[in-house]
Amino acid sequence: MSSMNELGYTEVNLLSSSLDLDSLSDQWAELRFLADEKAHLLSADLSHWNLYQSALSRLMPCLSDAEQHMNATKDGSDSSKIGSLAEAQKLLEAHQVYSLFGDV
């Protein structure tokens, strides 16, 4: 009779172990899914950061130039640089060309 009890006990242990492995497998699959999702989000964030840095590197020289022009206009020392509409249009065209081809 004890061998029958041992046999039943072994079957219960095997069944319990199988359920534990199934549960562990499900948890592992869920963790892999979450990790993949986080990696995708991190990759998208990194891509956006790179775009931001690229745009910033193109914008900062333009802001610096604008600041210099404004300071020159305030001081009156170099008002000929932006004194006419034609000159302002040339500066705008130069900026637009730089914006189109500045990252090449």
Image (cartoon, rainbow, N blue to C red):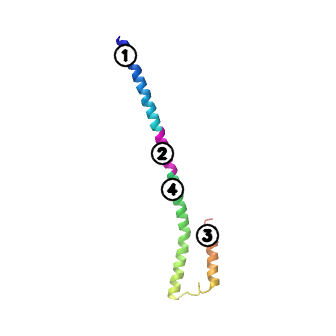
Give the mark, 2 or 1, whose residue is nearer the N terminus: 1
Q: In the depicted view, which residue is nearer to us: 26 or 99?
A: 26
- Label 4 vs 1, first from the N-terminus: 1
Q: Quadrant of residue 82?
A: bottom right
Instruction: Assign the C terminus to one quadrant of the image.
Output: bottom right
54 to 8, vertically: above or below = below
Label 3 with label 4: CB-CB less than 8 Å: no
Identify the mark nearer the N-term, 3 or 2. Answer: 2
Name the amino acid, label 2: Ala
The span picked out in magenta is 29-40
Residue type highlighted by circle 3 = Ser
C-alpha distance separating marks 3 and 2? 38 Å
Going from the N terminus, do you reach mark 2 or mark 4 first? 2
Residue depicted at x 49% and y 52%:
42
Percent across and percent down for residue 30 are 47, 40
How far apart are the two marked residues, 2 and 4, measured between alpha carbons?
15 Å
To which residue does mark 2 refer?
A: 35
Q: Which residue is mark 3?
A: 99
Which residue corresponds to the image point at 51% horizontal and 79% vertical from the top-left? 67
Please name the residue that numbered disc 4 is placed on: 45
Q: For marks 2 and 1, give the CA distance.
A: 43 Å
Magenta region includes residue 3: no
16 above or below 79? above
The question of residue 34 being in magenta is answered with yes
